[in-house]
Amino acid sequence: MGGDGLRTAIRLRGTFSPAGNGLTVVDYWVELRPYLVWAWPAAALVGFGVLIAGFIAAHLPIRYLWPFLPAVAFVGGITVYISWRQFQTLQAVLRQELAASG
């Protein structure tokens, strides 16, 4: 697959093989890409480290960081939602194609 499209931590994979009677057998499964699951928290920790360093360098109180916590939770929730919706869309397309071919 090319470098285009939305990248998420959930991937729907499978194989198509002829059944011999004109039908097609589909074997599919859901994959969780762990490197993407761990990359987001790692990036969040690095980002918070940079923010804290910036606050310290600017002589600002660390307590001013609290507004960033809901933002991180919101972005994380959006990421999970997009991944789940992409999985559901791929699954629906696969089911539609199978229903149309059989």
Image: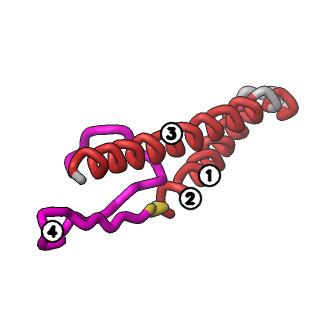
> Which-is-in-front pick, marks 2 and 3?
3
Residue 49 belongs to the span the image colors magenta: no
Mark 3, Cα crowd under 10 Å, few <14 / some 14-19 / many 20+, is: few
Cα distance between the residues tagged 2 and 3: 20 Å
Q: What is the distance, in whole Å, between disc 4 and disc 3 at their CAs?
A: 29 Å
User: Type of residue at label 3?
Assistant: Arg
| Residue range of the region highlighted in magenta in the rendering | 1-29
Q: Position of residue 12 (x, y in %)?
A: 39, 56
Q: Which is more foreground, mark 1 or mark 4?
A: 4
- As drawn, the label of residue 38 is 2
Residue at image position (68%, 36%) is 72
Question: In this rendering, would 58 be left or right of 20?
Answer: right
* Figure quadrant of residue 58: top right
Look at the numbered discs 1 and 2 and tell me whether their residues touch, using CB distance below 8 Å: yes
Residue under pointer 3? 85
Q: Identify whether 85 is placed above or below 14.
A: above
Mark 1 is surrounded, within 10 Å at the Cα level, by few (under 14), some (14 to 19) or many (20 or more) other residues, namely few
